[in-house]
């Protein structure tokens, strides 16, 4: 078997998250170095404040300030911080019950080593220098052996409350397309289009996907198809796509390559867009270095009869 | 309506660190063929199909649509999909069979963890406002739970190590498992959890066939009858939960009838050694119960399939006459947030 | 013993808009759920289980969001299931929930579907740059437009039919306070003059991108007897799937859609859908799909669907009203769109549809589809409980 194709796949987006009133107050409070909790009907104070009571499912709205000092309820030593985590040097993950709260907040604790951390230890918030109204406004916790912090007396009302956060998220994958598609992609290097025939229904799939989708069995027998084919249907695209260097309007067509039992999708060129028609006979146009044909152009043959391709529509 | 429903066949792939020579459908298809072959059924004979998988593992939206190619969904089939572990797909299929709309169901699930960095991917399950921006990885969260157990006096590091050692030792008898035999306990990944306390990251797929009543007896000489199945979820935030307990597991077990009579076998989906401690406590399993003879998730943990594998392994023991009453458990979410329990029985031999 | 009859006793939706900047994801789903509970005059304690659905997790960037949403939906300590069947998911989710009641596993179930598209960008989620593959050249409209052209070729429909559907649905939306698009100055001329995006599909013939959620309370016979308002009864429900792309696929009238409808009609004892069914909420993200689905669902013979549209049969006051709510063309929180169809069908038979209520609504079909026209889910609801 030839070497498996692999390539990096980066899934990255800056998600724009709008906030409900409780979250907005909490995160705005962090910006102002104030920690807010929310009280439940049975008198518990939840920190971080959640919008809905995890026990009763009630709406929660009553904000109350709690201390910026607290007690570690459990911890875990992270000797190798990962991308995006609060500290780049070894630290402890901690759940901290802040003074005045009944529940614990997850964050990082900056400590010299695991021997300096234990459940029950006292800690305080180390505020980030630059704060925007996000959970990262708490830079981390740090060990603290003083008195519980004084409350600021905040009412939970702030000027210019934050309404949302931007949560950038990046995940890195290594994509590999599998056996059948690898074979297909490798054949394209020689400008050949190679599909696979189903051993059961004998249909030829281009591109092959490793399985005949109607029979649910592996395809293996390779069949070269094309290079010519028939436009079965199409649309005229008038919107310029981001990251695509194609002038609009252009024609996006379904093309049944000769010998294939279903159409693949490609752009049509070499003919005015408004003269493209169902049944047009086309052939690929390759450009140097490209993996796929740049587009398909008319061959000059007479159009195919509708009956000849209507089953491929 | 009372309708007896049984697991009549189970198949799984070898679980491997990477399967990059195979697409998802190429990995899945042999398992589908194998489970159908065991019953002599064809796709067209199946009344309902349900699968479980996750786009986030694949890094692609709608990734499950291509997996359907391996089923041979033609003529069109009655089919559904959960973005959950396959154990919940099995639950959906079980309810479908209960309605009487179908007599047989194919349930499958698969996960390829190898393309991404699983520890980072799983952070995307967390509260997107307060927690996910800190990127606390799955091992870190499990470590917080493990430390809470140690602080509570429920376990210690050597007891945890023993769980990993036992799991991989028994896995020597399971050719599908990813980690088998004696392995060093290793360094801390996130203290107090060491390599040996953590599941291997791997790719795999599993499938089972369910059948109702007489159909089950036709398809299997000793069907694994589902006497009860239930699942429950807990609050999301770790800071509001007692991490040393699993009330959702206990409640699901109660509803599934697990406590009515002792089980002889249990397959627990405990990806971390510390979670086996929590689950044994919640399920009141004593030393008379054979726990995770397959090696469990510490020997092979194909995401989205590992829960279904627990049901399949428990059922297979009943099929082979090695168990008369078995409990299977599946979990989802950080620190055992959501749990499913099924109780399976074989008829007296 | 036969299946337990399933009744819809509560329905709630958010006002669908392009971006709900004032709520979290939890706040959005919560709003629909509370409205459904209010409609049913029930509380969280009355709910036995929650079944939630949405389209791909990448749309909001939250993996398996049901884990985070458990608290907001009162699911703590209860069973919670998460369904994902692409665009048909809203319908499938309702059917999974209905099965829990029909199987007598639970008495009363909350089912909900949502999408908060403003958190990201659906085009991004749909076109992640998969290595080695040719970038998608044309977007979602480009995927469906060639099938529309194939339909036009096959049926001989005049190219004006698509604009008629859009004009009708947008006017219907004006009567639905929850609809996203409220184009008060809409005219047929404006639809026909809107830019051609993916010829033959014009801008005004495409769906918007919405934030929204829809919830329903499903219950058994006993629950229905306690309901404060008339229930809608499920008379039949089914899902069908076929592969994404395959040799011989009929993208204009997929067999999975035909088979799904046939199954629903069989369960409900419908022999002539055109005669027996009073109205339809169908999943029409591009206007031409109305005539295409009319044929696929058996309301018209092959090639004849456009004639019903052209003759005004599908208008709000027509003989077979279609998309009384304004449909997907006026409101599209992707994962919720299918459930909105199901819920709007139920609203009609309950007589609770307000200004967009049709007079004779004894049996109404809710329809959803997704993927490459490959996943179908449908239910038929009626004002009277199923016989037997």
Image: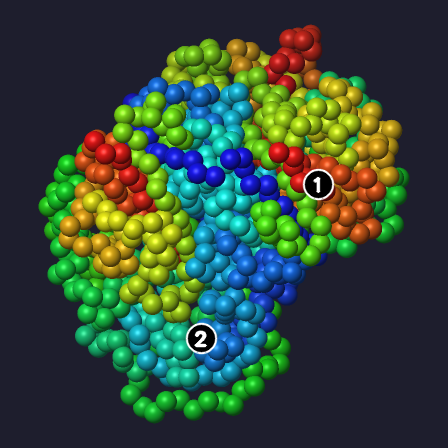
Q: Is residue B307 left or right of residue B96?
A: left
Query: What chain does mark 1 sit on?
Result: C
Identify the coloring: rainbow
Q: Position of residue B261 (x, y in %)?
A: 26, 49
Q: Is residue A257 left or right of residue C207?
A: left
* Same chain, labels 2 and 1: no
Query: How many numbered marks appear?
Result: 2
Q: Residue at x 83, y 45 (%)?
A: C171
What crowding class fits label 2: few (fewer than 14 Cα within 10 Å), some (14-19), or many (20 or more)?
many
Q: Quadrant of the N terminus of chain A?
A: top left
Query: What chain does mark 2 sit on?
Result: A
Mark 2–mark 1 Cα distance, whole angstroms, equals 49 Å
Quarter holding residue A239: top right
Can residue C70 be seen in the rendering of this structure? no
Q: Is residue A153 left or right of residue C233?
A: left
Quarter holding residue C341: top right
Q: Is B307 or A173 nearer to us in this picture?
A: B307
Q: Position of residue B341 (x, y in %)?
A: 34, 48
Q: Position of residue C173 (x, y in %)?
A: 79, 48
In contact (CB < 8 Å): disc 2 and disc 1 = no
The kind of secondary structure element at disc 1 is loop
Q: Residue at x 87, y 50 (%)?
A: C185
Query: Residue A47 has which mark?
Result: 2
The residue beneath circle 1 is: C384
Q: Is residue B84 left or right of residue A117?
A: right
Q: Position of residue A80 (x, y in %)?
A: 27, 61
What crowding class fits label 1: few (fewer than 14 Cα within 10 Å), some (14-19), or many (20 or more)?
some
Tell me if residue A64 comes above or below residue B177 in the rendering.
below
Q: Quadrant of the C terminus of chain A?
A: top right
Q: Is A284 or C254 nearer to us in this picture?
A: C254
Disc nearest the viewer among 2 and 1? 1
Can residue C273 be seen in the rendering of this structure? yes
């Amino acid at each position: 078997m030839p070497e498996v194709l692999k390539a990096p796949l980066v899934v990255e987006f800056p998600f724009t998250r709008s906030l409900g009133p409780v979250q907005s107050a909490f995160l705005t409070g962090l910006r102002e170095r104030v920690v807010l909790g929310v009280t439940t009907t049975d008198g518990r104070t939840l920190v971080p404040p959640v919008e809905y009571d995890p026990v009763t499912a009630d709406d929660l709205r009553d904000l109350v300030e709690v201390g910026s000092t607290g007690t570690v309820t459990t911890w875990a030593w992270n000797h190798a911080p990962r991308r995006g985590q609060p500290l780049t040097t070894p630290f402890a993950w901690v759940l901290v019950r802040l003074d005045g709260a009944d529940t614990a907040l997850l964050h990082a604790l900056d400590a010299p080593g695991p021997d300096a951390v234990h459940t029950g230890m006292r800690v305080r918030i180390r505020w980030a220098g630059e704060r925007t109204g996000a959970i990262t406004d708490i830079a981390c916790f740090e060990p603290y052996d003083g008195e519980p912090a004084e409350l600021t007396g905040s009412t939970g009302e702030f000027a210019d409350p934050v309404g949302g956060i931007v949560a950038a998220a990046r995940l890195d994958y290594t994509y590999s397309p599998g056996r059948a598609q690898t074979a297909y992609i490798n054949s394209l290097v020689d400008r050949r289009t190679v599909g696979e025939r189903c051993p059961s229904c004998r249909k030829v799939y281009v591109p092959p996907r490793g399985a005949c989708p109607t029979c649910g069995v592996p395809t293996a027998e390779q069949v070269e198809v094309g290079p010519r084919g028939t436009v079965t249907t199409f649309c005229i695209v008038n919107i310029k796509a981001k990251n695509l260097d194609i002038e609009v309007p252009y024609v996006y067509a379904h093309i049944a390559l000769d010998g294939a039992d279903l159409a693949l999708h490609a752009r049509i060129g070499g003919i005015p867009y408004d003269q493209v028609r169902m049944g047009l006979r086309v052939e690929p146009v390759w450009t140097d270095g490209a993996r796929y044909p740049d587009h398909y152009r008319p061959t000059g043959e007479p159009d195919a009869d509708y009956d000849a391709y209507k089953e491929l529509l | 309506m009372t309708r007896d429903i049984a697991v009549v066949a189970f198949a799984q792939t070898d679980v491997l660190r990477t399967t990059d020579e195979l697409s998802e459908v190429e990995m899945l298809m042999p398992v589908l063929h194998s489970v159908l072959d065991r019953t002599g059924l064809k796709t067209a004979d199946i009344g309902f199909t349900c699968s479980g998988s996750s786009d986030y593992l694949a890094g692609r939206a709608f990734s499950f649509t291509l997996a359907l190619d391996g089923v041979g969904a033609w003529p069109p089939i009655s089919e559904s999909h959960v973005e959950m572990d396959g154990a919940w797909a099995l639950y959906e299929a079980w309810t479908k069979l209960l309605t009487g709309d179908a007599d047989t169901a194919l349930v499958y699930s698969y996960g390829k963890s190898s393309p991404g960095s699983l520890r980072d991917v799983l952070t995307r399950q967390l509260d997107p406002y307060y927690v996910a921006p800190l990127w606390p990885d799955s091992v870190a969260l499990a470590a917080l739970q493990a430390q809470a157990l140690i602080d509570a006096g429920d376990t210690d590091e050597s007891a945890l190590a023993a769980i990993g050692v036992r799991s991989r030792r028994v896995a020597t008898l399971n050719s599908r498992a990813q980690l088998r035999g004696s392995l060093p306990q290793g360094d801390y990944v996130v203290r107090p959890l060491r390599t040996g306390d953590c599941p291997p990251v791997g790719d795999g797929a599993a499938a089972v066939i369910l059948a109702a009543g007489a159909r089950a007896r036709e398809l299997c000489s000793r069907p694994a009858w589902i006497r009860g199945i239930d699942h429950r979820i807990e609050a999301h935030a770790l800071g509001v939960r007692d991490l040393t307990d699993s009330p959702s597991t206990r409640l699901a077990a109660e509803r599934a009838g697990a406590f009515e009579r002792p089980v002889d076998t249990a397959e627990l989906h405990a990806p971390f050694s510390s979670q086996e401690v929590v689950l044994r406590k919640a399920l009141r399993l004593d030393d008379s119960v054979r726990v995770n003879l397959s090696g469990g998730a510490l020997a092979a943990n194909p995401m989205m399939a590992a829960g279904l594998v627990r049901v399949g392994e428990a059922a297979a023991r009943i099929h082979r006459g090695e168990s008369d009453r078995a409990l299977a458990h599946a979990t989802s979410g950080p620190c055992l947030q959501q749990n499913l329990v099924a109780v399976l029985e074989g008829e007296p031999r | 013993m036969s299946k337990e009859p399933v009744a819809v006793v509560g329905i709630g939706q958010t006002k669908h808009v392009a971006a709900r900047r004032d709520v979290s994801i939890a706040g959005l789903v919560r709003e629909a759920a509370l409205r459904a509970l209010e409609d049913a005059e029930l509380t969280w304690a009355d709910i036995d289980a929650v079944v939630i659905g949405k389209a791909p997790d990448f749309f909001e960037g939250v993996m398996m969001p049901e884990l985070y949403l458990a608290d907001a939906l009162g699911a703590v300590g209860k069973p919670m299931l998460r369904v994902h069947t692409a665009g048909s998911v809203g319908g499938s989710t309702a059917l999974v929930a209905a099965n829990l009641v029909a199987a007598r596993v639970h008495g009363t179930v909350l089912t909900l579907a949502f999408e908060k598209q403003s958190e990201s960008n659906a085009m991004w989620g749909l076109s992640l740059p998969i290595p080695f593959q040719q970038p998608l050249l044309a977007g979602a409209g480009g995927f469906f437009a060639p099938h529309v052209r194939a339909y036009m070729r096959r049926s001989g429909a005049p190219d004006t039919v698509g604009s008629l559907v859009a004009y009708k649905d947008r006017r219907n939306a004006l009567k639905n306070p929850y609809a996203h698009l409220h184009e008060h100055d809409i005219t047929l001329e404006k639809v026909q003059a809107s830019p051609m995006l993916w010829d033959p599909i014009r801008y005004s013939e495409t769906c918007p991108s919405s934030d929204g959620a829809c919830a329903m309370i499903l219950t058994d016979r006993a629950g229905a007897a306690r309901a404060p308002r008339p229930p809608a009864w499920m008379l039949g429900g089914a899902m069908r799937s076929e592969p994404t792309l395959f040799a011989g696929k009929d993208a204009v009238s997929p067999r999975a859609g035909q088979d799904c409808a046939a199954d629903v009609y069989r369960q409900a004892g419908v022999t002539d859908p055109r005669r027996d069914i009073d109205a339809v909420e169908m999943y029409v993200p591009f206007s031409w799909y109305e005539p295409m689905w009319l044929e696929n669902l058996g309301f018209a013979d092959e090639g004849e669907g456009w004639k019903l549209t052209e003759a005004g049969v599908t208008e709000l006051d027509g003989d077979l009203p279609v998309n009384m709510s304004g449909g997907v063309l006026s409101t599209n929180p992707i994962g919720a769109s299918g459930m909105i169809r199901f819920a709007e069908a139920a609203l009609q038979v309950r007589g609770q549809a307000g200004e967009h209520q049709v007079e004779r609504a004894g049996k109404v079909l809710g329809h959803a589809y997704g993927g490459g026209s490959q996943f179908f889910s449908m239910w038929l609801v009626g004002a009277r409980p199923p016989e037997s």
